[in-house]
Image: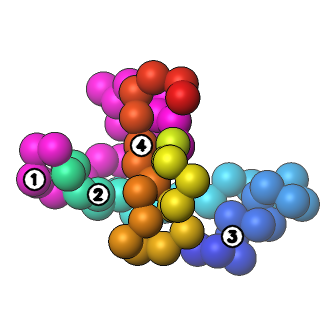
Amino acid sequence: MTHEFFEWCLKDDRRPVWKPVKFYITGSDRWMTRNVFPPPEAREVSLFLASNGHANSIVGNGRLQWDMP
């Protein structure tokens, strides 16, 4: 799939035919299968990275938030 993708994007080759996409929805705790991704019912949202200056490790205070910091 990767080779076909790059041929399509970088060399203006024909668009590859891909198998259906299977993906996980974390908030709903379920798997879905669609012929296109993102699915038509998806909506785009903006999240912002924030921290109190110590987001440099797994125990750091980095977080995602809805509002711009």
Q: Dot 3, how many residues are within 10 Å of its Cα: few (below 14), some (14-19), or many (20+)?
A: some
Q: Residue 60: where, in percent of width, then height? A: 43, 65
The residue labelled by disc 1 is: 29
Task: Return the disc, 3 or 4, that comes first in the chain's sequence.
Answer: 3
Task: Return the disc, 3 or 2, that comes first in the chain's sequence.
Answer: 3
Q: Is residue 37 visible?
A: no
In the figure, 57 relative to 54: above or below? below
Label 3 sits on what residue type?
Glu
Which residues fall within the magenta stretch?
Answer: 27-49
Label 4 sits on what residue type?
Leu
Secondary element at tag 4: strand
The residue labelled by disc 3 is: 4
- The answer to if 40 sits in the magenta stretch is yes
The quarter of the picture where residue 44 lies is top left
- The answer to if 31 sits in the magenta stretch is yes
Secondary element at tag 1: loop
Horizontally, is 52 left or right of 12 in the view? left
> Residue 62 bears which disc, if any?
none
Identify the image quadrant of the N terminus: bottom right
Q: Residue 57: where, in percent of width, then height? A: 48, 73
Q: Dot 1, how many residues are within 10 Å of its Cα: few (below 14), some (14-19), or many (20+)?
A: few
